[in-house]
Image (tube, rainbow, N blue to C red):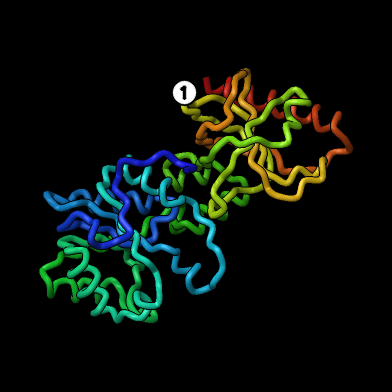
Amino acid sequence: MLFPDPRVQIHSTFAAIAKPTAIALGNFDGVHCGHQRAIELLLNHTGSLHSTVVTFDPHPQQFFSGQPRQLLTTVPEKAKCLESLGIEQLALLTFDDYLVHLTPAEFVTKILHQELAAQQIVIGADFRFGYQRTGDAMLLTQLAAEYGIKTHVLELEFDRDKRIGSSRVRAALLDGELREVDRLLGHSYSISGLVVPGQQLGRTLGFPTANIEYPPIKFLPRLGVYCVRVDTEQEQQLPAVMNIGKRPTVNGQSTSVEVHVLNWSGDLYGQQLTIYLDQFLRPEQKFSGLPELTNQIQADCVAAQKFYGADN
């Protein structure tokens, strides 16, 4: 496993879901500030119902395109975020031909009423559902009311006159604009994974690194070097430098995530790490050789120490 089990319940079958429910519907990729407002609204109307976020697996865009969809939050990461916000369970609806071909009325009757026993529903104003996305928030409100289900429609969240959305978070990550990412998410973007053996090049250069095995579906930010904080299984918030890239100086081929914890020594092999991205330092580049690479790594470490020293 790449992630510790969250306490929030994750269900992929209707039978396992605790009912009756108060649900928030959507993809919730990133669990950004707009999602958090929806969850806040949900919890305000949960009462004795089981608070449930209902999302789709695989992501609808992956289903229709046939191409893998990289996610801001994997299912375990999403569950961990939802747990911190007070959600009881995460329900994963299998996004398949059956679900795709349900009419709006069938979706409400068969999924929301019969399978989920929903009593309260929270959706965004732009929510679409049913065959060919023919259902909207108004229709859902009307159809749900026939079963005594109350629907709460949340207006879209904006930041600096632009809508807060997962695509905007992705764009900011690809630009290395972590301050904007933090503002949109309400927290730092993170990458979690297991420390596995690497080429141990950093150790020979005097900067031992932890090679992180991250989930293939995890969305990675701009390639380059970052100031990050690291949570190990024993310690938290350790300042570090992270490199995401293909290591062109040594003719690397695949993308790797490597972390050097500042002023720290120990064995991290086999440990689960969570890395919080704070500052983009520089893009990935190819150096003339190992001496030049070593000098740059030293400069990166000094920059990170200065960054965190100023914070402290």
Residue type of the residue flagged with mark 1? Gln
Query: Is 119 on the left or on the right of 212, as rendered?
Result: left
Characterize the local packing of mark 1: few (<14), some (14-19) or many (20 or more) Cα atoms within 10 angstroms.
few
**Residue placed most toward the observer, 6 or 32:** 6
Query: Is 244 on the left or on the right of 276, as rendered?
Result: right
Task: Provide residue 116's location: percent of width, then percent of height.
Answer: 21, 63
174 versus 124 height, above or below: above
Q: Can you see residue 170? A: yes
155 versus 37 height, above or below: below
- Residue 70 occupies quadrant: bottom right
Residue marked by disc 1: 234
262 versus 6 height, above or below: above
- Residue 156 occupies quadrant: bottom left
SS class, disc 1: loop
Query: Is 60 on the left or on the right of 68, as rendered?
Result: left
Which residue sits at x=14%, y=66%?
A: 149
Task: Provide residue 213's location: percent of width, then percent of height.
Answer: 58, 42
